Image (spheres, grey):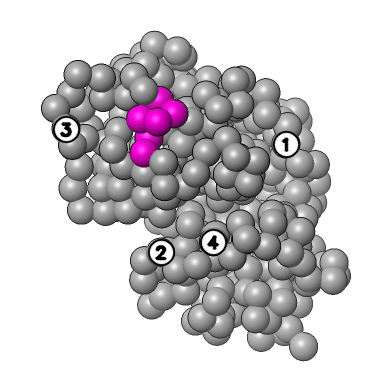
Amino acid sequence: MLERARALLEEAVAEGAIPGGVVGAVAADGRRERAAVGRLALLPQPEPARLDAYYDLASLTKVLFTLPEVLRAAEQGLLDLDDPLRRHLPEAAWLQPGPNFADRTLRELLAHTAGLPAWAPLYTWGQGATLKARVLQEPWPLGAPVYSDLGYILLGLVLERVRGKPLAEFNLPEGFAWAPPPERTAPTERCPWRGRILRGEVHDENAYALGGAAGHAGLFGTLDGVLDQLEAILAGRWLSPAALAEMARPHTEERALGWSRKHPGWSGGGLASPAALGHTGFTGTGAWLDPERGVGWALLTNRVHPTRHGANALAWLRPRVGNAVLAEVP
């Protein structure tokens, strides 16, 4: 399943598009293939890529942590997807004229249809509990639906409230961590704000300011950790059948709950079936699954090492890797 996909990754490394990375594919019955190519690190000295390395998953946090945690809370009766945000965070938008963002539902936040802004430089406002309080009091404007980090930050706060503990204390599956061992972790950027190359600490500035674990970013994972989750989805073991069905149901032309559906220009490749789902992360990560073909695949790179300010080759690499994997499925 990986012969051509590995060759594509080797080409990207040779062209200097990425330092290196790992790619893997898994079938519903557990068969999997993996490959590591290029470098894990370029600075301060080169290190070879390794299959057991942790990568900063960035926005894969949304679908591999926040989404299943919200759905499990729904399964356990702690919340309903159609609850307004204010039901769980009554201080949200306190004394603000309505309707406002606190009236938006958890489902709308999950599907990126709430109309919240995409992003804001929260890390310039403060850190920790004070920053979380300001996020809930900021008069966020509502507009046309856009992909929103802010929506998932709010979902993370809901999870902390209904579980009574910070996200950093949630149990994580094997192969995932909020603070992985730096020596086993792919470094990301030489961060101007923090003044150092980031290794074992989250790349996303807002997630760092929120404590390192947030609803939109902060999760680190190994290739096998990600493939384990894709295998569980394909095999129907990730959540209850009802929750899995609701997760995969189309909520917009381009999105299910959290996951991106196949559409023109989709990151998973044009050979995927209409039921395929996927998601990407800013640091250079991505995970996809095609239930009709019975396969899932992941590409984990640190394309922001040592800087984010360069051409993003993953826009062409990701769909080609997906097509290569799908073409080798029996």
Q: Which of marks 1 and 4 is nearer the N terminus?
A: 1
**Separation of residues labelled 2 and 4 (CA atoms):** 9 Å
User: Please, is residue 113 above or below residue 152 in the view?
Assistant: below
Amino acid type shown at disc 3: Gly
- Residue 172 is tagged as 1
- Residues at badges 3 and 4 in contact (C-beta under 8 Å)? no
> What SS does tag 2 mark?
loop
Q: What element carries label 3?
A: loop
Label 1 sits on a secondary structure element that is loop
Q: Give the crowd class for mark 1: few <14, some 14-19, many >=20 residues within 10 Å.
A: few
The residue at which mark 4 appears reads as 246
- Residue located beneath label 2 in the image: 251
Among all residues in the image, which is located at the extreme top?
Answer: 130
Q: What stretch is highlighted in magenta?
A: 84-89
Q: Quadrant of residue 298?
A: bottom right
Residue under label 3, please give it: 98
98 above or below 225? above
Q: For the residue labelled by badge 4, is the local secondary structure a helix, a strand or a loop?
A: helix
Question: Looking at the image, which residue is at 60% across and 40% down?
Answer: 77
For label 3, the crowd category at 10 Å Cα-Cα, with few meaning under 14, some 14 to 19 and many 20 or more, is: few
Measured as percent of width and height from the top left, residue 131 is found at: 38, 17
Which amino acid does the dot numbered 2 rest on?
A: His
Displayed quadrant of residue 240: bottom right
Q: Nearer the viewer, residue 218 or 113?
A: 113
Alpha carbon distance from label 3 to label 4: 29 Å
Compute the Cα span from label 2 to label 3. Answer: 25 Å
Query: Foreground mark, 2 or 1?
Result: 2
Is residue 29 in view? yes
Task: Name the image quarter holding the N terminus.
Answer: bottom right
Q: Position of residue 186 (x, y in %)?
A: 66, 40
Nearest-to-viewer mark from 2 and 3 = 3
Judging depth in this view, the residue of 34 and 210 nearest the camera is 210
